[in-house]
Image (tube, grey):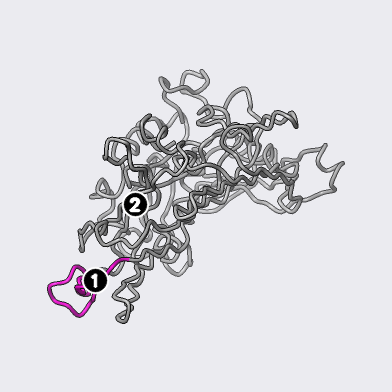
Amino acid sequence: MLALGTAGLQALRQRGARIVAEVSVGSPVSKDLTHLLVEPPSVRTSVRPLQRTPNSGNVSIQCYNHNNLLSEWKASGYLNNRWQGARVTLKLGVLLPTGQTATVTNAVMDLDDVMLDFSNHVATLICVDAFGRLRRNTINGALAGVTYTTESPTKIAADLIGYLYTVGVPGAGYGSIMDPVSWQAYISLERVSGQTIDYTVPAEEDATSWMQAIELMLAQTNSGIRWNSAGLLEVYRFYPGTGGSQMVLDTALNLSRLTTSKPGGDIENSLTVKRGDGAGGYVETAASPLEDATSITNHGHIGKGVVYDYLADLFADNMAQERLDQKAEAPRIFEMDATLETMVLELWDQVTVIDTPAGLSEHALIFDKAVTPGRGTVRLKAYAFTELAEPWLFTENSQTYDSAQLVW
């Protein structure tokens, strides 16, 4: 959950709380444009639950342009043909009774276009998902064909991201785009314990996107990536139940509308499981396919998915079993209209959804958030999960994972 502070949360709970926004454009522009904002923009972020990769979509930010500081033809202006691909950071928050502001990073995006309205002296910054480059570009350059041996998966993912986003040198310079503490902490947690990863970065002709390669690596340790409240990339481990609930969402407290559904189109009850064969290919594990007998009885055989892992059978099967646990039955989806205090929730935060008259109390994970400051509303989507007793990741000394143990 984003850290807005006690005073900030209390201010958001007040009727008529004044929402404020801050917008900055990074290198090569390196300018704070907050003083030019017309109004706080609406922003929506979402994540596909299985891929666990955020998508901020398109966001339009309107700025005053009376002095043409945002006109690309003005040599002394802020942009002057130097803005393509610049990182845009949007912070939303609240004006405190003291006159100060409390804000948190709500979205990190790439500046894709600047639309100029000369008649009304307005410039609109068209911002797109900051992961767009990773999804769009295919592997090429110095990393294509590079083979990693006995490296941690997170270290390989960091190299892939750092090469494209910064200086283009594998393993160098990515601290400027990532939270070094977060990434190094997870890299240090990953220790080879009788297993090695022989991974060759695919060549451009294989049409593998950077994001596909990164997701493949992070899947080995059941991790995802997101932009944190400092506006930097971080890696996080996914496992329902290990993080604890970040906020209670209650129809008697902070929800004005709650609906539920169980879409059956996402059911999978049979998964083919493959692991790396050490020669650049894959072989099925001994236990493949993994199946859920109860779900097959209820819904028939639905075998749409294949789970790939570079590690041994045990890790591949455990990763597939976790996916099967979540997909064997139709997921319970919650859609909620919430008060402004809930805008501090981040994608993949764990919440508790409560409606006391209905007897409802469920653990759920946030996978979609839309904040509309002008209306003072937040729309959330979450899906329910069953808390399990222990994660499938184990430490080197066979104790279950906690923050004090090394884990592979």
Indicate the amino acid at tag 1.
Leu
Of labels 2 and 1, earlier in sequence is: 2
Give the residues drawn in magenta, as a range. 63-82
Q: Would you identify the image quadrant in which residue 81 lies?
A: bottom left
Q: Would you identify the image quadrant in which residue 169 lies?
A: bottom left
Count residues near mark 2 (Cα–Cα under 10 Å), then give few for <14, some for 14-19, many for 20+. many
Tell me if 87 is positioned left or right of 205 in this view: left
Residue 376, above or below 386: below
Circle 2: element type: strand
- Measure the C-alpha gap from mark 2 to mark 1: 19 Å
Q: Which residue appears at 69% of the width and 45% of the height?
A: 259
> Along the line of sight, which residue is nearer the eye, 351 or 238?
351
Residue identifier under label 2 = 21
Q: Which residue appears at 20% of the width and 59% of the height?
A: 30
> Along the line of sight, which residue is nearer the eye, 320 or 133?
133
Count residues near mark 1 (Cα–Cα under 10 Å), then give few for <14, some for 14-19, many for 20+. many
Indicate the amino acid at tag 2.
Ala
Residue 110, above or below 281: below
